[in-house]
Amino acid sequence: MTHDDTPKQGDRFRTVFLEAAVPLLSFGGTVTGILLWGMGLRFGIQYAAIGCVLGSCILAYLAWIRQKKDIVSLTTPLYAVIFFAVPTDYLAGIVLQLLFAASLTILLVRLKFRFGGVRESGRAAGNDLEEPLNSYCGTVREHMAGVSTETAHHAAVAFARFARGEYREAARVAEAAMAEPEYATPWPLLVTAFSIVREQGLLLEDSPDQPDRFIDFSAPDAGLLAKSLPPEGNYADRFGVSLDNALLLLYAVAWNASTKDRPLLLAGQGFALKLFAP
């Protein structure tokens, strides 16, 4: 077992434990209440619903830690409080609790099979990224190994600033990246990407018309670009596509070479995915 495998296995064990706890607590509380009543101990049967309440809280947590959120599962604690806060007759309370426990179990199965796996803690997993972004990051990783963590960090920050509409700040970070001593990179493609982000960030900040001449990728770069380059004479489309490609390249480089920036990149994944649109 490697060091990187340990947190992943711990996450799986904890998830399995919590998934098993949902039906066990939900049905267990009610069954315990029935047994205590059968032994002659009389109390408000609504207190036996504590298992349902706890089970609903665990289910909501399991829904929250998934990449795709299930709104129904997230709101089950609210319904548990509404259903079981008021005293009720023994038979009606037992029936309601059993039905609620069965519903939680059904929702758990639905959550497990329709809303994907949980996000692993510690080192981010590659499948945290959706397609086609995940595949593109894999392509860049295969052909651009060796980018320094410092350069990758600048790439992550420049992308994040641009995604938030902070164009001048993104341009400043791109310029700072190219000025760093560590920037002695064998990747002219990365130099072009930073240059495009710098140039277009300043242009967007000042809101001028599109220039007739601008920094662009060349035909030999096409193999590592996320989007196909329009014909050279199509300046309007090529201007926008060059920026999309530059931002996606910075994202992929940062994802592969700067693990510490992955939470920042995951937060901007939605913006990155929109860049793939034609």
Image: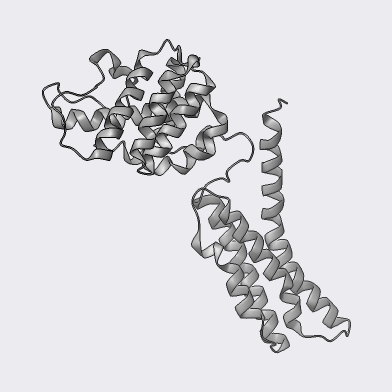
Residue 145 appears in the rendering: no
- The way the protein has been coloured in the rendering is one colour
Out of 163 and 49, give the one closest to the viewer. Answer: 163
In percent of width and height, residue 59 lies at 62, 60
> For residue 164, what is the image quadrant?
top left
Instruction: Indicate the position of residue 248 as horizontal and vertical percent values.
Output: 36, 30
Which quarter of the rendered picture does the C terminus lie within? top left
Q: Is residue 165 above or below residue 33?
A: above
Q: Residue furthest left?
A: 233
Q: Residue at x 52, y 32 (%)?
A: 126
Compared to residue 111, the image places residue 40 above or below, namely: below
**View extreme (bottom): residue:** 89
- Counting from the top left corner in percent of width and height, residue 150 is at 52, 23
- Work out whether residue 13 can be spotted: yes
* Residue at horizontal 17 percent and vertical 32 percent from the top: 237
**Left-right relation of 183 to 94:** left
Q: Nearer the viewer, residue 24 or 228?
A: 228
Q: Can you give x and y, in whole percent of width and height, for residue 39 in the image?
A: 89, 81
Q: Is residue 254 left or right of residue 76?
A: left
Q: Is residue 189 left or right of residue 256?
A: left
Identify the image quadrant of residue 81.
bottom right
Counting every numbered tag in the picture gives 0
Vertical order, 218 against 259 (above or below): above
Image quarter in which the N terminus is found:
top right
The residue shown at (55%, 62%) is 73
Which residue occupies 71% across, 40% down?
A: 10
Which image quadrant for residue 190?
top left
